[in-house]
Image (spheres, rainbow, N blue to C red):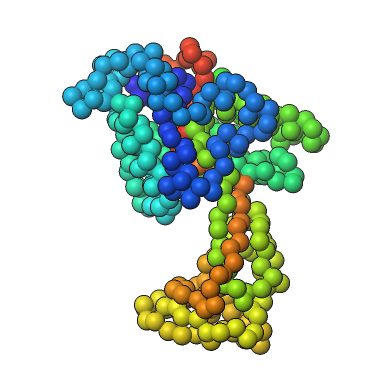
Amino acid sequence: EVKSLLRDRDFLVALSRSINRDDINQLVYMGFTNDAIEIWPEAVQSDPEVQATYGYDVEAANALLDGIGMTERDGDGMRLTPEGKRLSLTIIGLPDYAIHLDVGELVVSFWREVGIRATLDAVPSEVWWPRVREGDYDVVAYQTDYASTPHGTLYALTYPRSFFPVDPSTYWAPRWGTWYATGGVEGDEPDLEDGKRLVELYEQALQTVDEAEKQAIMEETFHTLALDMWPIHLGANRAEPCIIKRNFKNMATWGEVFWPFYGIKASKPEQCYFEPGERQWTGVDRSGLRKRYPTPDRRHSHGAAHAWGAPPALAAGLLPKQSTPPHDTLSCFRPHFASFAIQTPSLIPLPAVAPAPASPPAGGRRGCGWRGRW
C-alpha cells in the first residue's frame, strides 16, 4: 500500500508542498542554495504545473491528502492510508553525508505537520548498497547529479543515473536501473509508461550525433522528471565556501564543482603560492596541542598545502584555530549538481495481488523526491 501511494502524484505533490525549503536553506545550507525549481531548464521552470509543485503551502498539501482519501487519523494525529491502515515512511540516509541526515530530520518534522509519519534511518555504508539495490526503503535522502556544463548534455549522458533508470544507483528506481544494467537478469522491467520512455530517450541520446537533437531529448527528459517528481528537489545549485588564508595567493575565487571534478583540483592549484613575510599564526594539530607555526615562504612551499592547512579542501594535518592577521578571504566553489532531493522507491513493482497500472494513476504523474524509491 505504501508503494501504491508513492506512485500517486497527488501524494508526492503533497509531500513536496509541505516542505519549507526556505527554512532548510537557512538552517542547513546557510542561505547558499538556489530555489529548487532552478535546477530545471527555463522551459520547464515556466510550466505552471511544475511551478505548482514547489511552493510551500501546508493548506494545499492537506487538501491533496484529503483528496486521495487520507482523511482518517490515528490517536497520535497521524494520517491513515485510504484503506484505514497505519502509515509510516522510512527515510534512509548515509552517515558519510551528515548534512543529508540534517535535512532529513527537518523533512520528518515538516511531514508530521500534515499528518504524515516518517522516521529517519542512518544506514551504514556496509549495508547501504544492498538496501539500495533491493529497494529496501521508502524514501532516500541524497543529492541528485544534475549538472550544467559548457558541453550541454555531455554530463547527463556520461553520468546518467539521476536522469534515466539505467543504473542500480538510480535512487528513485533502483530495481529498474538494475534491470537495465544487467540486461534483464536482475531487477524489474519498468512497468510505467514514463519509465519506459526514459529508457528509450537514453538509448536515442546515445545514438544521436546532432547536438540540437540531443538537447531536445534532454528537454523531454527534464520535463518528464519534473512532472513525475522523480525526485522531489529541495534546493538547486549551491555555493560551497572555502576559507583561504590571506597569504595563500593566486587562488581562484569561483569555480565549478561536480562529479568527478570535485574540489580545488579543477582550479589549477599548481598556480597558487604562499606570500613570504606574513606573521605567525596559531593552530591546533590533530593531537589537540596548541602550537605556533611560522608562515612558509616560497622556498618551503613544496607540499605546503598539507603542512600548513591553507584551504580546508587541501588541509590534511592542521585545523586552523586562529590566524594572524585576520580577515582571511572567502572563495566559493559552486557545484552544478548539488540539488538535494527526496526520492521514493515507489517504482518498485506492486505485489501481484495489486498489479501496477500501465499508465500514471488518475490525477497526474508519479514522483519521487528526497530520493524516494520507486
- Count how many numbered circles sit on residues in the image: 0
Q: Quadrant of the C terminus?
A: top left
Examine the rendering and report whether any part of residue 167 can be seen. no
Task: Identify which residue, 52 or 177, lies in the foreground.
Answer: 52
Residue 328 image position (x, y, % from top left): 56, 69
54 to the left or right of 85: right
- Specify the quadrant of the image occupied by residue 261: bottom right
At horizontal 61% and vertical 52% (from top left) the residue drawn is 334
Q: Is residue 99 left or right of residue 252?
A: left
Does 45 sit left or right of 103 as displayed? right
Q: Quadrant of residue 203?
A: top right
Residue drawn 55% across and 36% down?
36
Query: Which corner quadrant holds the N terminus?
Result: top left
* Residue at horizontal 52 percent and vertical 67 percent from the top: 312
How far from the left and from the top, in percent, is residue 65?
37, 19
Q: Is residue 108 left or right of residue 55?
A: left
Which residue reaches farthest front? 326
| In the foreground, 365 or 158 | 365
Residue 257 versus residue 83 in the image, above or below:
below
Residue 183 at x, y percent in the picture: 56, 34
Residue 59 shows up from this direction? yes
Q: State the image coordinates of residue 209 (x, y, percent, origin top left).
A: 80, 36
Residue 84 versus residue 260 in the image, above or below: above
Q: Residue furthest left?
A: 75
Q: Residue at x 63, y 82 (%)?
A: 301
